[in-house]
């Protein structure tokens, strides 16, 4: 009886761990492993991202220092299953919408659109199978309209 209860509790724990969202937690940008051109609005000296589950939402706080020394401070929420980001602080202008879509447990895509519905950028995020690193590939255009592509590597401390 005890052995059966023990096995059932282990299976329950395994199911909980398997179902856990690998995007949640604290992530630090590894600048040395990342490839971010200087014309990218995402060029940074350091970035820490904290993603926490809050009911049906994921609450995300981004703090750091941009390549030019200015502070980075962004806060937004997004539905756990994907949807439109709601920026609370430091987001893009009101004419930009960011919509996420979960592809699988470890993969998420985002589309950035302007007020006229034109796609102006994309993000593709993949958490490694061991859950310790996240690769974020971005495509977009800088404020002058020059295209850029980035690969940002984030790691759990």
Image: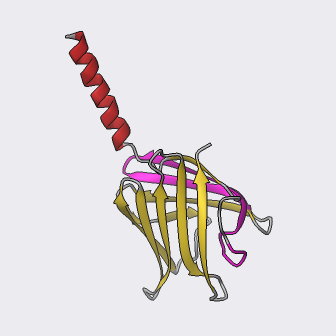
| 128 with respect to 89 (left or right) | left
Looking at the rendered image, the quarter that the N terminus falls into is top left
Which secondary structure class fits the magenta region best?
Answer: strand
| 35 with respect to 2 (left or right) | right
- Above or below, 62 against 147 in this view is above
In this view, the residue in front, 9 or 69, is: 9
How is the model colour-coded?
Answer: secondary structure
- Above or below, 37 against 102 in this view is below
Looking at the rendered image, the quarter that the C terminus falls into is top right
Number of marks present in the image shown? 0
Report the magenta residues as a range. Answer: 37-65
Q: Residue at x 54, y 60 (%)?
A: 135
Residue 58 falls within the magenta-colored stretch: yes
| 52 with respect to 47 (left or right) | left
Where is residue 17 drawn, in percent x and y?
Answer: 38, 37
In this view, the residue in front, 107 or 74, is: 107
| 128 with respect to 30 (left or right) | left
Q: Quadrant of residue 89?
A: bottom right
Where is residue 15 drawn, in percent x and y?
Answer: 30, 36
- Above or below, 129 against 85 in this view is above
In the displayed image of the protein, which residue is found farthest to the top?
Answer: 1
In the displayed image of the protein, which residue is found farthest to the right?
Answer: 69
Q: Residue at x 47, y 67 (%)?
A: 124
Q: Residue at x 45, y 89 (%)?
A: 116
Where is residue 99 drawn, in percent x and y?
Answer: 42, 70
Where is residue 152 drawn, in percent x and y?
Answer: 60, 63
Residue 120 falls within the magenta-colored stretch: no
Q: Quadrant of residue 110?
A: bottom left
Q: Residue at x 61, y 56 (%)?
A: 62
């Amino acid at each position: 009886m005890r052995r059966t209860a023990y096995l059932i509790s282990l299976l329950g724990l395994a199911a909980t761990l398997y179902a856990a969202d690998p995007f949640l937690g604290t992530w630090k940008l590894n600048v040395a492993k990342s490839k971010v051109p200087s014309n990218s609005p995402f060029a940074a000296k350091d970035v820490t991202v904290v993603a926490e589950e809050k009911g049906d939402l994921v609450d995300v706080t981004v703090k750091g220092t941009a390549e030019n020394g200015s502070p980075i401070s962004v806060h937004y929420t997004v539905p756990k299953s994907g949807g439109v980001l709601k920026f609370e602080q430091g987001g893009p202008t009101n004419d930009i919408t960011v919509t996420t879509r979960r592809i699988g447990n470890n993969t998420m895509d985002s589309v950035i659109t302007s007020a006229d519905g034109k796609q102006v950028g994309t993000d593709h995020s993949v958490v490694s199978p061991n859950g310790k690193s996240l690769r974020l590939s971005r495509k977009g255009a800088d404020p002058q309209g020059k295209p850029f592509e980035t690969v940002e590597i984030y790691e759990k401390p």
